Image (spheres, rainbow, N blue to C red):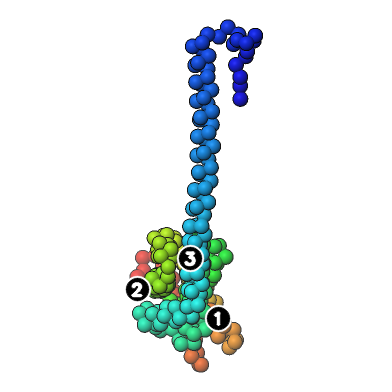
Amino acid sequence: MWKLPKIGGDYCGITKDRRRRLVDRRTLALGYRHTLQKDTMQAHRGQDRRQPSTDAADDGLNALFLRLDQRLDAITEEMVEHYRREIPAYANLPQEVLDNDVRPVSRRNLEIFFAAVKRGTGPLDTELETVRASAAERAVQGVPLTDLLHAYRAGTRIAWAGILDEVARGSASQQELIGRLASYVLSYLDSVSTAVEEAYLREWHSLVYRRAHGRWELANELLTDPDPARTKALAKSAGIILPDVVQVAALPAWPRFAPGLTV
């Protein structure tokens, strides 16, 4: 706070009008500072009032996914049943593969989906590695890529329906989350679809190369002195089922003719 210099009972040669202007300016400065302090205090109080709302939204989100965790097995069963009923490649898989492979993988994918949507982010790198591994396994099993992507889209749709069902039963604060959760679902599906396609095609190309190379080695083995165990292993890697008895005929190379001769 500043003061006007005062000498001998007067203000060192400053005129009356000048003093009035200085006093008015001082009053304005003090008023501005008071207003600034008041606004700052109101802003803090406003933040304090908003904080419980944010906490309530977080509590509602946690409660929502706690209920969904209790439905993991039921939603997984619905997903696997849809695959078996609606997707040809999955319908042709043995029941043992559906029970011991497709079902646990689907449950893990559902856990990854719920975790990603709850976080509001895409899947983590470690979670995508799980997705890539299962996609590579489907390539080895001969599941077409179109059917595999159909399964992921259908599974996501079934999981989202489960979220909507729980939201409809929940509080008003949970129902307000639908728009935000929907955007997280789209982010998840985009990340997972890309990871699935890349992993599947990489494994498929490797599989095609291994089978072509295996057939070449199998032919060489059969044309020499074949060992039964090695022959079966090579046939398996080449994707060929050999009968119990194999007869091999070696054809001579195509003869070379002199220039100008035809046959």
Query: Tag 1 or tag 2, which sits nearer the N-term?
Result: 1
Above or below, 244 against 41 in this view is below
In the picture of the structure, the residue carrying the numbered disc 2 is: 263
What x and y, as percent, mark residue 251?
46, 81
The C terminus lies in quadrant: bottom left
Q: Nearer the viewer, mark 2 or mark 1?
A: 1
Say what amino acid the circle numbered 3 marks.
Answer: Gly
Secondary structure under tag 2 reads loop
In the picture of the structure, the residue carrying the numbered disc 3 is: 60
Asked if the residues shown at circle 3 and circle 1 are in contact, with their CB atoms under 8 angstroms apart, the answer is no
Say what amino acid the circle numbered 2 marks.
Answer: Val
Q: Residues within 10 Å of mark 1 (few under 14, many from 20)?
A: many
Say what amino acid the circle numbered 1 marks.
Answer: Leu
Q: Nearer the viewer, mark 3 or mark 2?
A: 3
Asked if the residues shown at circle 2 and circle 1 are in contact, with their CB atoms under 8 angstroms apart, the answer is no
Q: Residues within 10 Å of mark 3 (few under 14, many from 20)?
A: many
Q: Which residue sits at x=55%, y=85%?
A: 232
In front here: 122 or 245? 122
Q: Which residue sits at x=38%, y=71%?
A: 168
Asked if the residues shown at circle 3 and circle 2 are in contact, with their CB atoms under 8 angstroms apart, the answer is no
What x and y, as percent, mark residue 64?
47, 69
In the picture of the structure, the residue carrying the numbered disc 1 is: 234
